[in-house]
Image: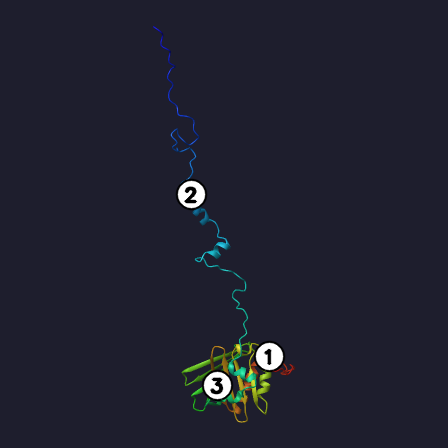
Amino acid sequence: MSAEPKSSPEKPDTPPKTPEGESSVGKPVKSSKSPLPAEKKEVIEKTIQALQAPTPSKLAQSPQVPIIVERADASIPPASPKNPPWTLQQFFNDEIDLDVELATRFQNMPVLSIFRERGLGTKSGRGVATLSSGDGAAQVIFDADATTKTVQMSFTFGAMLTLRFSLDSLTDANRDRWLALMRRREGGLSFLWGPSRWEHDYLICISRQYHTNIYAFSPNNFEAGARMTPDVLNKLLDWLDKFWNADDADGTDESPDLLTW
């Protein structure tokens, strides 16, 4: 009998070599350094972005985060000169008579024929002048401060309603010029206002032989008017002159004759 051929010893089945991460059947397997899941990676990225300081471009694109710009002059509003009131515009254009127009608007004004003055404390340098009508129904109270030279006027009617005006932007030239115009024998029109003119409280006065009309205006859209006798006017001018020129040693005025406007 012929001898049977010898068979080679059986070798254990070993999977063929495959790239790292794959088995012999082509299924992926987890390696020692597996990548992070997509959800976890997204959470980490959002956390890092939240911890970083936002840039101006991101703030501008986000409607939920307002942009706050800090400036040293943020509290100072930009200068915006206002147009004069319509009545003054017409007067400056020589289209109306301001005396007639104001008399039409302020009809039957109370006549202030009584003048009283008093101090307001002993060391404050302030005083009060009260101009009232004969029946006491209407009065105008002037409060003056010798230090700041500020004057406040309170128009009161029936002890119920008061409108207050403050002349706190006047210069020495404005005050002296107005006093000189109000003491003219021929009378006439005069304005008492500062460099800002109608943008602050101001007065329009019209003097005549037997009376003087005083009109007060405010940029806050309220105004008042009254009529005073010549005697009350003279006392008021002397009283104001005392507070406005309290610091003058010789009482002389060498300032140029400037216009009120």
Q: Quadrant of residue 80?
A: bottom right
Q: Nearer the viewer, mark 2 or mark 1?
A: 2
Q: Residue furthest front?
A: 1
Above or below residue 213? Residue 74 is above
Residue 90 position (above or below residue 56):
below
Q: Secondary structure at mark 3?
A: strand
Q: Residues within 10 Å of mark 3 (few under 14, many from 20)?
A: many
Front disc: 3 or 1: 3
Q: Amino acid at mark 2?
A: Lys
Q: Is residue 119 visible?
A: no
Task: Compute the Cα span from label 3 to label 2.
Answer: 78 Å
**Left or right, residue 180 beside residue 228:** right
Mark 3–mark 2 CB contact (< 8 Å): no
Gap between marks 3 and 1, in whole Å? Answer: 25 Å
Expressed as whole percent of the image width and height from the top left, the position of residue 7 reads 37, 13
The quadrant of the rendering that contains the N terminus is top left
Q: Which of the 4 quarters of the picture holds residue 138?
A: bottom left
Compared with 123, 75 (above or below) is above
At mark 1, the secondary structure is helix
> How many numbered circles does the render carry?
3
Nearer to the camera, 230 or 202: 202
* Of labels 3 and 2, the one closer to you: 2
Q: Which residue bears the numbered disc 2?
A: 41
Pointer 1 residue:
172
Q: Residue at x 42, y 82 (%)?
A: 161
Which numbered marker is on residue 148? none
Q: Is residue 170 left or right of residue 5?
A: right
